[in-house]
């Protein structure tokens, strides 16, 4: 069963952006079991244990750390991973939420600005690879030197899409988009 609020968000995202706006905290998590509860000296095994915090993630930016136990999102209690995931799925990249954690047996509140899968807070439009009909890779330093360029992204695969229609071919290197340098597939997005 999927809550109607999540279904509504998914439908609205698809209609407006062509893809679901998935917000991420940027943590690896697991349910708090008896062993973790004992290790952290918690009263009972509940909440969501932060096993890892991804570099540059929304959680890291906010100050959430490994071994924190997430117990609440805004005013909603979360006792297990599935409940945390459900709460986060209600939001979009760029939304700011309160994440309550237990750290050293003290309740702490963090204001977190959620990010997307690209590590930004911006809205993600339909997958750019699908729109352009291409996949991209970073250009090696050796190839940059050989071509006497300082930046660029290579087209590694091409199918029907905007780039093929424009006459661009596999192996071409994109150095700028709208006069702005690009140096990674993430920057193409």
Image (cartoon, helix red, strand yellow):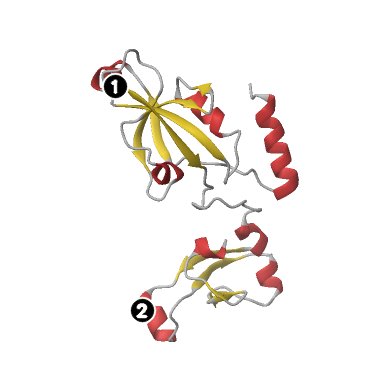
Q: Residues within 10 Å of mark 2 (few under 14, many from 20)?
A: few
Residue at point 52%, 46% (across, down)? 115
Residue at point 73%, 40% (across, down)? 12
Which corner quadrant holds the N terminus? top right
Badge 2 marks a residue whose secondary structure is helix
Judged by depth in the image, the label closer to the viewer, 2 or 1, is 1
Badge 1 marks a residue whose secondary structure is helix
Residue position marked by numbered label 1 in the rendering = 36
**Residue 67 to residue 112: above or below:** above
Which corner quadrant holds the C terminus? bottom right
The label shown at residue 142 is 2
Residue at point 33%, 24% (across, down)? 106
Name the foreground residue: 142 vs 43. Answer: 43
**What percent of the width, then of the height, locates residue 187?**
52, 64
Name the foreground residue: 150 vs 109. Answer: 109
Q: Residues within 10 Å of mark 1 (few under 14, many from 20)?
A: some
**Residue 77 to residue 15: above or below:** above
Residue at point 71%, 72% (across, down)? 165
């Amino acid at each position: 069963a999927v809550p109607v609020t999540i279904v509504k968000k998914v439908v609205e995202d698809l209609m407006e952006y062509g893809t679901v706006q998935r917000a991420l905290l940027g943590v690896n998590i697991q349910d708090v079991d008896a062993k973790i509860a004992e290790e952290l000296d918690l009263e009972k095994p509940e909440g969501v244990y932060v096993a890892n915090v991804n570099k540059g993630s929304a959680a890291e930016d906010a100050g959430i750390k490994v071994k924190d136990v997430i117990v609440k999102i805004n005013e909603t209690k979360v006792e297990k991973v599935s409940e945390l995931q459900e709460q986060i799925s209600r939001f979009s990249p760029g939304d700011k939420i309160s994440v309550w954690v237990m750290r050293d047996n003290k309740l702490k509140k963090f204001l977190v600005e959620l990010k997307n899968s690209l590590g930004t807070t911006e809205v993600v439009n339909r997958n750019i690879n699908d729109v352009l009909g291409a996949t991209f890779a970073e250009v090696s330093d050796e190839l940059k030197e050989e071509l006497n360029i300082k930046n660029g992204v290579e087209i590694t695969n091409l199918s029907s899409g905007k780039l093929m229609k424009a006459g661009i071919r596999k192996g071409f290197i994109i150095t700028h988009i709208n006069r702005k340098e690009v140096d990674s597939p993430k920057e193409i997005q």
